[in-house]
Image (cartoon, rainbow, N blue to C red):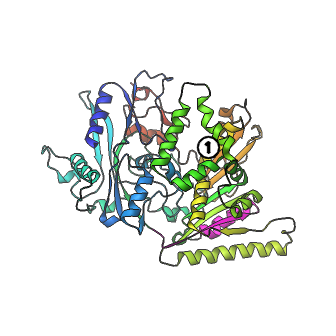
Amino acid sequence: TLEQAIKGLQAIVDAGCVVVPQGSNTGLTGGSVPRNDTEDTRPSVVLSMKRLDAHFPIDDGKRVVCLAGVGISTLASSISNWFPDRESHSILGSTFLNPTTAAGVAFGSGGTLMRKGPARTDRALYCKVSRNKWGENTVEVVNTLGIEGLQDSDFQEHSGENPVQKLDVYANDVRQGYRRTMAKSSKTGLQIKASDTDYQEKVCQYTKDVSRHNSDTTGEDCNRSEGKVLILATVHDTFQAPSKKRMFWVSFPDMETTAAFRREVCLDNPADLPISCEYLDRDSVDIIDRSGRIATYLIRYLGTGDIMGYLWNVKSAIGELPFSWAPLFCDKFLHVFNNWVPEAIPSKFLNKGREYDHNCMVAVGEFGDGTLDRFMERMDAFIKKYNDKALADDVSEGGKMITYVEAESQADITALNAFRFVAALAFKTYVVGEDLQGISVDYGLPKNYEGVPPLADSAVKPLKRMRYSHFGCNVIHEDIAYALGVDTHTEHMAFKQAVEVEGGKLPAEHGHGTEYRAPQDTQKRWMNMDPLNVLNPGIGGLSYLPKYGQK
């Protein structure tokens, strides 16, 4: 229960330990893990929130309440069943491993869907730890849920009742299958953001600013807190589902044309944004096809959620066996047997990916206002303009034209989405299978940046540079493969500097963890949230010591 989580947090800090909050333990959102190689001698306790998995709609389905352990795939399935014309925030991306909604908020993850933006809400129930004037550790529960009957003002002081207990009762009834009258937002709650409502406008502003990044300090403390508060529950907007959807694989001859497509077609205006626009370079297509076929098929036919989560846990358990071969066994197996299975997406898409260096998977929906038709008009006009010019300039001789192939069925759409979102898994399988090593980086580039950050002259030349991105918001994932013996940490830090020289920010959505040093204002924000440094110490370059080493 929520009350048990709060008491557990109090007991842990009273015992002189530090707390590492944990969701589904997928590792996708960059959460820290307990470490024993630091100057801090305090024991670490992992506080798993996984069993807090109740969720229920409010406001006639326009919003949903999630306790901290609810998986994003579980939530997407529930919303679809409850309200077929609505959908939750995260229905693409890493849903196949079912990370929690609370982790998404804590790291600002999930920007695949251009019309929704990253995970963000200012309506939450969360805990902060401090110390009172008598030297006692105190757990403060912050309540900005904004739900009628659950606001702090709804309870008399010393009455013995509080919002946590009442929410526990409601959530338990939901979990047991009892029907309850649907709750409503309070007048105050309706004034508080339950999603990034400004994102559509912001992403279309072609400026030097970055659309989203992990060091953003705006919003309620639960947002991008990276474990410095303990999130108990959150309220999220749901979204209108498209009445019709079309998906295209669009291939471009060069990066300049690809960027122009993004600017002139995808980001033309906030009302007509596509559902998603995902970029894949040729190395990405090659590596996913070479090492990600099995994973793609698993997602296509097993779907997302519990089964895939179970298989992921099995893979992790095998990797933790006390044998020297164990950590690499599963990826070696997947790499060896990859080519024993058929190509995971239809050849009409894969052949274009092999032929062209730059590809976009664009999904467009109709939302009752002509969005789909207007997008198609812009896309057709853009392609005609470019190809006509290419023909007039004779560029097409020995060169390439813009081409696109449409997904003709739901099976095609499912296959393409699965192919794109196993990219990170495929890269790990590839480097293990080929006896290489690699680094993985996620970063946001300025919205008006239209190139590829150059590697430093002193950098070691990589064997593969796999670039795939949430193209609409210019958030990039790069997986870079090197030969064994290369100092990957040095290359990683050099690449970080190269991105920052171009005006980029990293990390963008997978968290600082203990790998990246956060900007000073971000560090200060976290220190204000957790002045004792008892929650997830060491993140973002902060000290591991009590009170950050201050007396």
Residue drawn at the location 52% of the way across and 78% of the way down: 370
- Drawn side of residue 380 relative to residue 130, left or right: right
Image spot of residue 262 (x, y percent) = 64, 64
Magenta segment: does it hold 174?
A: no
Amino acid type assigned to the residue bearing label 1 in the image: Val
Residue linked to disc 1: 441
Kindly state the secondary structure of the residue where label 1 is placed: strand
Find residue 209 and report its horizontal and vertical position in percent.
57, 56
The extreme front residue here reads: 340
Q: Specify the quadrant of the image occupied by residue 265.
A: bottom right
284 up-or-down from 327: above or below: below
Magenta-colored stretch includes residue 252: yes
Residue 377 is situated, as x and y percent measured from the top left of the image, at 63, 78
Q: Which residues are magenta?
A: 241-268
Residue drawn where x is 53% and y is 62% of the image = 114
Q: Is residue 58 above or below residue 131?
A: below
Asked whether residue 515 appears in the rendered view, the answer is yes
